[in-house]
Image (tube, helix red, strand yellow):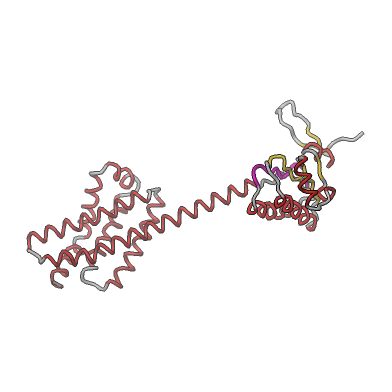
């Protein structure tokens, strides 16, 4: 039986380039596979990585699996990276891996008919090659999953940064227009972003507008108070605008003195208090912020 496994293994190993071309032929018959893989990855590169895995399938039949399995693992990771690089989906690359199984079994079936191998040999080949294919598929899936998670994390981080915009309106002055619900996580983000951007922009005053926040409960009110306190410790004065009656009541119930928040009814009033006014530019129809002229 070992001689039969050695023979089949050598047959696959010695013809790994030809078998890689067979994979190419099988995939070419499937229009969806061809468009997903063949049209994106150069032919030479495709044949090289396919032949490498075919070689592993042959070697696993007569060599130490502790030597071959790490090679297959390395192949799977590299192939997953290539598929990501060329924008090939996980489902497409896994369908291709399944094609390798078909090609290998075609070879085995041909030899089985010609040499009359024992039935147990077919079972042994399956026990060795199938787990290797499964491991390759698993590794490719893990790499794709990790890449997807990294992309989502990057997108989420960018979205978070946009959720706490710090908009400079004049030298040393910036506005933070908060829109949408504020939970514990976002409240922490408000603290981090305002402190970081306040230092980076060398701000002396920050206007935090909460008119776009639908609900401000005791937790949110307390967090906003902490933000203003923290900014004060870094030398940045703060003004809270957009305080509705129900928000004012929540703040008072917490025992916070409204004067400590330096409140204003709206953003326009806050900017005027800082000596700024909006002047319409008749040429551009824009509203730049300029120092207010006092008579």
Report the span colored magenta: 167-181
Which quarter of the figure has residue 7?
Answer: bottom left
**Residue in the picture at 21% in, 71% down:** 62
Residue 253 rendering spot, x and y as whole percentages:
79, 50
Residue 19 rendering spot, x and y as whole percentages:
21, 56
**Is 278 displayed left or right of 193 in the figure?**
right
Q: Nearer the viewer, residue 289 or 261?
A: 261
Which quarter of the figure has residue 234?
Answer: bottom right
**Residue in the picture at 74% in, 32% down:** 287
Q: Residue furthest top?
A: 282
Q: Nearer the viewer, residue 215 or 209?
A: 215
In the rendered image, the quadrant that contains the N terminus is bottom left
Whether residue 169 appears in magenta in the rendering, the answer is: yes
Residue 182 rendering spot, x and y as whole percentages:
66, 48
Whether residue 183 appears in magenta in the rendering, the answer is: no
**Is 94 displayed left or right of 265 in the figure?**
left
In the rendered image, the quadrant that contains the C terminus is top right
Q: Nearer the viewer, residue 219 or 168?
A: 219
Residue 168 rendering spot, x and y as whole percentages:
73, 44
Q: Is residue 8 above or below residue 231?
A: below
Q: Is residue 136 above or below residue 228?
A: below
Q: Residue furthest front?
A: 253
Tell me which secondary structure the magenta stretch mostly adopts. Answer: strand
**Residue in the picture at 23% in, 44% down:** 29
**Is 273 displayed left or right of 149 in the figure?**
right
Q: Nearer the viewer, residue 135 or 280?
A: 135
Q: Is residue 13 above or below residue 266?
A: below
């Amino acid at each position: 039986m070992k001689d039969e496994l050695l023979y089949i293994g050598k047959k696959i190993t010695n013809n790994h380039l030809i078998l890689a071309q067979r994979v190419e032929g099988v995939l070419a018959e499937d229009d969806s596979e061809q468009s997903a893989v063949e049209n994106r990855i150069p032919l030479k590169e495709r044949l090289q990585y396919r032949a490498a895995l075919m070689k592993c399938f042959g070697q696993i039949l007569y060599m130490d699996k502790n030597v071959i399995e790490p090679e297959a693992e390395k192949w799977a990771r590299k192939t997953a990276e290539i598929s990501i690089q060329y924008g090939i989906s996980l489902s497409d690359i896994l369908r291709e891996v399944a094609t390798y199984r078909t090609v290998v079994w075609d070879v085995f079936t041909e030899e089985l008919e010609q040499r009359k191998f024992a039935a147990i040999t077919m079972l042994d080949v399956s026990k060795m090659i199938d787990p290797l294919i499964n491991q390759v598929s698993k590794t490719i899936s893990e790499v794709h999953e990790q890449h997807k998670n990294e992309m989502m994390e990057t997108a989420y981080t960018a979205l978070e940064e946009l959720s706490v915009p710090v908009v400079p309106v004049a030298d040393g002055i910036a506005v933070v227009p908060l829109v949408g619900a504020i939970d514990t996580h976002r409240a922490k983000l408000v603290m981090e972003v305002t402190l970081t951007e306040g230092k980076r922009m060398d701000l002396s005053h920050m206007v935090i507008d909460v008119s776009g926040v639908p609900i401000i409960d005791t937790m949110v009110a307390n967090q906003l108070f902490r933000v203003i306190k923290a900014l004060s410790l870094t030398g940045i004065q703060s003004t809270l605008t957009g305080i509705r009656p129900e928000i004012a009541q929540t703040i008072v119930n917490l025992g916070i003195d409204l004067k400590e928040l330096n409140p204003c009814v709206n953003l326009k009033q806050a900017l005027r208090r800082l000596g700024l006014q909006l002047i319409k530019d008749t040429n551009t129809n824009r509203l730049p912020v300029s120092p207010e002229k006092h008579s």
